[in-house]
Image: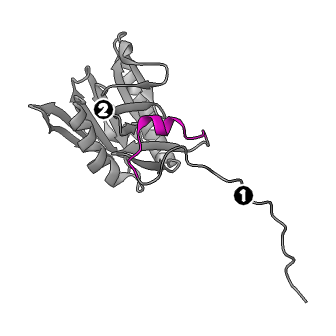
């Protein structure tokens, strides 16, 4: 006698990869991936799927986005993820927040480095944001890169100086970061998670 009746299942539909395996992927390959509701990025030809962010992450993104929108000049856009930024043919990222000139956008993506890329750290993305994305934004010439740690809370700001990132600010808690790039804005890390 069987305690559990077998469940009849339908065979899984066959998924055909839209690219040839065992080679680095490109932007064109990524654009052929079916929209399945997941957030995909491409770093050095490797597909990266990002899990859904936490509440604290989303609060920090929303509040920083609002802060940046308050001071944004008319010739720039401030966008939040997901929106594709093509740093190269094999690197397509979706920063949590980006700022770039309006004329640089296409309907589908930003085909150049933004003026500002912001990543809010999550346990699953911390190393990618602080190492891989840091170096890819730097290599692409992104003038400003900010990383927010909502757990501390802390904001670290790097700006391009002589072709490399230099840390220009690191503030925590109630400290105020008075920033001028890409435009004047003040950020208090504690205000991003309250």
Residue at the extreme right: 1
Indicate the position of residue 103 as horizontal and vertical percent values: 37, 12
Q: CA distance from mark 2 to mark 1?
A: 49 Å
Residue 155 visible in the current orientation:
no
Residue drawn at (42%, 39%), measured in percent from left and top? 60
Tell me the quarter of the image containing the C terminus. top left
* x and y, in percent, of residue 91 in the image: 35, 39
- The kind of secondary structure element at disc 2 is strand
Dot label at residue 24: none
Residue farthest along the front direction in this orientation: 20
Query: If you read the primary sequence from the N terminus, does the residue marked by circle 2 or circle 1 appear first?
Result: 1
Mark 1 surroundings: few (<14), some (14-19) or many (≥20) residues within 10 A: few
Q: Main secondary structure of the magenta part?
A: loop
> Eyeballing the image, is 167 above or below 72?
below
Q: Give the label on residue 12, or none.
A: 1
Which residue sits furthest bottom? 1
Q: Nearer the viewer, mark 2 or mark 1?
A: 1
The residue that appears at 48% across and 39% down in the rendered structure is 30
Query: Badges 2 and 1: C-beta atoms under 8 Å apart?
Result: no
- At which x and y percent is residue 96? 41, 37
Against 75, residue 186 (above or below) is below
Per the rendered image, the range of residues in magenta is 23-35
The residue under the point 39% across, 25% down is 110
Q: Residue 5, how many percent across, how many down?
A: 87, 77
Residue count near mark 2 (Cα–Cα under 10 Å), binned few <14, some 14–19, many ≥20 = some
**Who is closer to the viewer here, 29 or 85?**
29
Quarter of the image with the N terminus is bottom right
Q: Looking at the picture, tell me which residue is in the foreground, 116 or 157.
A: 116
Q: Which mark is residue 187?
A: 2
């Amino acid at each position: 006698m069987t305690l559990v009746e077998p469940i009849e299942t339908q065979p899984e539909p066959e998924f055909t990869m839209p690219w040839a395996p065992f080679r680095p992927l490109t932007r064109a390959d990524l654009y052929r991936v079916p929209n399945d509701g997941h957030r995909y990025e491409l770093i050095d030809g490797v597909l990266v799927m990002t899990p859904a962010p936490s509440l604290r992450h989303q609060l920090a993104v929303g509040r920083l986005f609002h802060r940046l929108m308050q001071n944004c000049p008319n010739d720039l856009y401030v966008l939040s993820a997901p929106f594709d930024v093509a740093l190269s043919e094999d690197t397509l990222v979706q920063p949590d927040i980006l700022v770039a000139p309006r004329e640089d956008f296409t309907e589908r993506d930003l085909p150049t480095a933004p003026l500002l890329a912001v990543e809010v750290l999550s346990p699953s993305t911390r190393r990618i944001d602080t190492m891989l994305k840091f170096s890819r934004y730097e290599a692409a010439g992104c003038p400003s890169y900010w990383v927010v740690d909502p757990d501390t809370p802390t904001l670290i700001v790097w700006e391009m100086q002589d072709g490399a990132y230099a840390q220009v600010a690191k503030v925590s808690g109630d400290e105020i970061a008075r920033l001028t790039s890409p435009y004047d804005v003040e950020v208090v890390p504690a205000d991003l998670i309250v």
